[in-house]
Amino acid sequence: MKTFLASLAVAATAAIPAAAVTSHDAAQVKIQRYAPNVDVAALSNAEVATLLNVINSGDSRSDVSAKIESLVRAYQ
């Protein structure tokens, strides 16, 4: 699982410029749709970008929610 999270983080950092155009408020709304208890303000820009990449991955809603919750736990 740690290998998966590490590879996901590496892949996400490559897409940071694309996510950088998303405002903080818009990112918070998107992330909280999948994980309502996430405090987006406590996350770094790279972490937010990673979560947005997971949301935009095309996976099912339940898979996206599970991945986001897993990543947020890893970030804390």
Image (cartoon, rainbow, N blue to C red):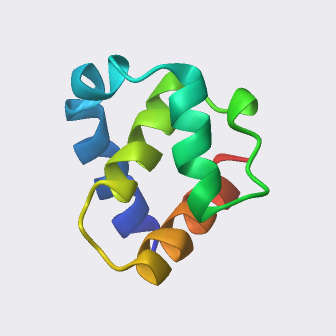
Residue 25, picture quadrant: top right
Displayed quadrant of residue 54: bottom left
**Residue at the spot x=73%, y=28% of the render?**
41
Above or below 42: residue 58? below
Q: Position of residue 9 (x, y in %)?
A: 36, 46
- From the viewer's perspective, tell me whether residue 43 is left or right of residue 14: right
Say which quadrant the N terminus sits in: bottom left
Work out whether residue 62 or residue 5 is closer to the camera in this orientation and state it. 62
Splitting the image into 4 quarters, where does residue 18 fall?
A: top left
- Residue drawn at x 59%, y 67% is 70
Pinpoint residue 12: horizontal percent, then vertical percent: 30, 42
Q: What residue is at 29 percent from the left and 33 percent from the top?
A: 13
Q: Nearer the viewer, residue 73 or 32?
A: 32
- Residue at 60% x, 58% y is 33
Task: Give x and y (percent) for residue 72.
Answer: 64, 54
The answer to whether 9 appears left or right of 45 in the picture is: left
Indicate whether 51 appears above or below 57. above
